[in-house]
Image: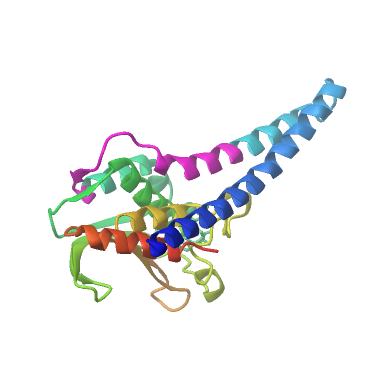
Amino acid sequence: RTAEILRANQKLIALGRLTASIVHEINNPLESITNLLYLLEVDPSSEHRQEYLELAQSELSRVVQISRQTLNFSRESAGPVPVHPSELIEEVLTLYGRKIADKQLQVEREFETAETVKVLPGEMRQVFSNLIANSIEATAPGGRLRLRLRSARNWADQGVQGLRISVADTGSGMPAEVRSRIGEPFFTTKGAQGTGLGLWVSRSILHRYGGGLQLRSSVSGAHHGTVFSVFLPTNMRPQAVVASRAASVASTPQ
Ligand code: ADP
Ligand code: MG
């Protein structure tokens, strides 16, 4: 009982922190939109008119970007269904087809199993979309993405059975100071182009399934690049689900 209440409390605290940082993050662009509209109102024929409008538009699209990445994953009506992760991956690759072609990236697939996982497809699509988008962004033209799907019998040495899906790229890799901040909401090295929510959201989704995200990255040598491995359990017992929920609350970034 006490443990349950404590857990619920921790969850609320984590949620409160996230809400505060989202409000903060959305407030800046909203303030600047307000200012730009004011400038246009007091001087509708200003020579900077076009500039103000463009700025307001780009601030607005940042707000939209943040709200999309934050809310999408909590909104899906239908319950979990068995899906082949490879199908979701193919959908995401189609979505990014244009960017992949523009950068002339080579895409390799190694799908070694036809096992399914029971998930909300939209959520899992979002996880793969976040990882694949990051890999595309980090990789120089002519680089390579490798997507692997295989069975995992003993994840994190806990005897949990499931699937491991990895997204590997030949991109820039992450220096230690970036690696240590992965999973912090709003941490981005992409300035206004990034939201810093992709990995945070992905990790929260995976934790709710009793799964997780692992990272290997190297910035130097012939094999620079990054590998993100998603683990999804296939034989989750109810107790294990409760335990992993607690773990996900405990590991919510402070
Ligand atoms: P965003 O992409 O909006 O910056 P993410 O949460 O998706 O936010 O990623 C956070 C940061 O992690 C990125 O800004 C980048 O520095 C780093 N990162 C993520 N994926 C990769 C990758 N595949 N290669 C190199 N760096 C990455
Ligand atoms: Mg991203």
**Image-quadrant location for residue 247:** bottom left
**Image-quadrant location for residue 34:** top right
Q: Is residue 73 at least partly visible in the picture? A: yes
Tell me where residue 239 appears, x and y as whole percent. Answer: 24, 61
- Looking at this view, is 158 or 174 the one in front? 158
Q: Is residue 189 magenta?
A: no
- Looking at this view, is 232 or 150 the one in front? 232
Figure coloring: rainbow
Tell me where residue 7 appears, x and y as whole percent. Answer: 43, 60
Q: Quadrant of the N terminus?
A: bottom left
Tell me where residue 68 appears, x and y as whole percent. Answer: 49, 39
Q: Is residue 67 magenta?
A: yes
Residue at position x 70%, y 33% in the image: 56
- Looking at this view, is 173 or 32 the one in front? 32
Find the residue positioned furthest to the top: 45
Left or right: 2, with 46 as reference point: left
Find the residue positioned furthest to the left: 114
Find the residue positioned furthest to the bottom: 221
Find the residue positioned furthest to the front: 1
Residue at position x 22%, y 57% in the image: 238
Residue 51, compared with residue 80, is above or below; it is: above
Left or right: 232, with 201 as reference point: left
Left or right: 12, with 147 as reference point: right
Q: Is residue 137 at least partly visible in the picture? A: no
Tell me where residue 70 appears, x and y as whole percent. Answer: 49, 45
Residue at position x 27%, y 59% in the image: 241
Residue 175, compared with residue 58, is above or below; it is: below
Residue at position x 49%, y 57% in the image: 9
Counting labels gives 0
Q: Which residues are magenta?
A: 62-86
Residue 95, compared with residue 138, is above or below; it is: above
Q: Quadrant of the C terminus?
A: bottom right
